[in-house]
């Protein structure tokens, strides 16, 4: 299947979130539950992506955050640990009766969504929401116009990531920051069904609307978006298959290094 051209330029983490680079900016935590992964079994967010997520939160200083896709909760824990004291973190995953093989794989045999933060120092700032797929927006009404930071990492099928994004846009304040994971631009991946491999086509479609200004974060599979960044962001536009990039044929992940 042919893919459309990429409209989402690549930028450096420090240019997108410069506040993370200041001396004493804050904390990032290494989530100890990730130590149970062997090097060839990839965690949901590899190390530099965890740093990028933490850096974005440190820079934005959000008071109210939402994550779509809790999984084991390592991302949630990073959000909570790096957000200002008193911040509210909402994290969304599927109700038990709606979970399939994908969730089981993510949980690695566990059934405890959010296990990484349940016994952590941050557990009281995190609120879990378990939903059905295609949960109506009305279920999130209490968060409308309250969200400063949204991390979208749930269903990666086209309709799923689109639906989570549209909900996040409804909930987000005018200056909210949005982050998506799993922006894969490998030509072989894009050659698979658009419905299944939804993040790249959906985010490119969103970029084309001009509603948000989107940047892929170099060295990661993350994309960051805001309605207005308020300044020019140095960036370069790559197309799927353009190589060599700074990370070779694929961005190097720990298991491939
Ligand atoms: C990639 S994992 C999330 C990883 C997590 N954000 C992290 O950083 O560790 C994706 C999760 O999204 C959940 N999910 C899938 N479809 C969903 C939906 N429609 N609504 C909410 N969560 C969903 C899955 O059950 C799974 O736990």
Image: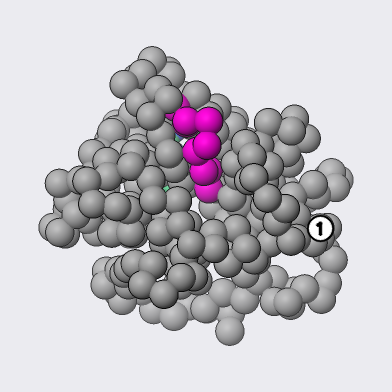
Q: Under 8 Å from ligand 1: the CB of mark 1?
A: no
Which residue lies at the image location 81% right of the left edge and 76% below the top edge? 244
Quadrant position of ligand 1: top left
Q: Can residue 164 be seen in this snapshot? A: no
Whether the magenta-drawn stretch holds residue 173 is answered as yes
**Residue 141 vs residue 73, the one in the foreground:** 141
Q: Quadrant of residue 77?
A: bottom left
Q: Secondary structure at mark 1?
A: loop
In magenta segment, residue 107: no
Q: Residue at x 62, y 63 (%)?
A: 15
Residue 36 locus on image (x, y percent): 30, 74
The residue under the point 77% across, 73% down is 245
Which percent across, then down, holds residue 89?
29, 43
> For the point 80% across and 49% down, which residue is it?
6
Of residues 110 and 79, the one nearer the viewer is 79
Residue 28 pos. (x, y %): 35, 68
Q: Position of residue 200 (x, y in %)?
A: 69, 46
For this view, does 190 lie left or right of residue 141?
A: right
Q: Which quadrant: the C terminus?
A: bottom right
| Residue identified by numbered label 1 | 237
The reply to whether residue 87 is visible in this rendering is yes
| Tag count | 1
- Furthest-bottom residue in this view: 257
User: Would you say the magenta stretch is mainly helix, strand or loop?
Assistant: strand
Which stretch appears magenta? Answer: 171-179
The quadrant of the image that shows the N terminus is top right
């Amino acid at each position: 299947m042919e893919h459309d051209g990429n409209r989402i330029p690549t930028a450096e983490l420090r240019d997108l979130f410069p506040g993370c680079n200041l001396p004493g900016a804050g904390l990032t935590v290494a989530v100890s539950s990730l130590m149970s992964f062997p090097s060839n079994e990839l965690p949901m967010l590899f190390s530099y992506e965890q740093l990028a997520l933490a850096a974005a939160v440190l820079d934005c200083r959000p008071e109210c955050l939402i994550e779509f896709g809790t999984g084991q909760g390592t991302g949630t824990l990073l959000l909570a640990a790096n957000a200002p004291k008193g911040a509210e973190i909402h994290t969304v995953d599927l109700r038990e009766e709606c979970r399939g093989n994908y969730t089981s794989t993510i949980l690695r045999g566990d059934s405890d969504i959010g296990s990484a933060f349940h016994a952590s120092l941050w557990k009281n700032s995190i609120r879990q929401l378990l939903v059905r797929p295609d949960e109506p927006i009305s279920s999130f009404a209490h968060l409308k116009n309250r969200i400063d930071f949204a991390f979208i990492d749930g269903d990666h099928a086209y309709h799923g990531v689109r639906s989570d994004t549209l909900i996040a846009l409804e909930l987000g304040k005018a200056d909210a920051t949005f982050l998506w994971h799993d922006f894969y631009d490998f030509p072989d991946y894009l050659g698979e069904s658009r419905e299944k491999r939804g993040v790249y086509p959906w985010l490119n479609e969103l970029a084309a609307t001009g509603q948000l200004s989107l940047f892929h974060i170099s060295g990661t599979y993350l994309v960051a978006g805001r309605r207005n960044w308020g300044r020019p962001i140095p960036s370069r536009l790559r197309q799927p298959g353009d190589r060599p990039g700074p990370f070779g044929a694929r961005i190097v992940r720990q298991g491939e290094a």
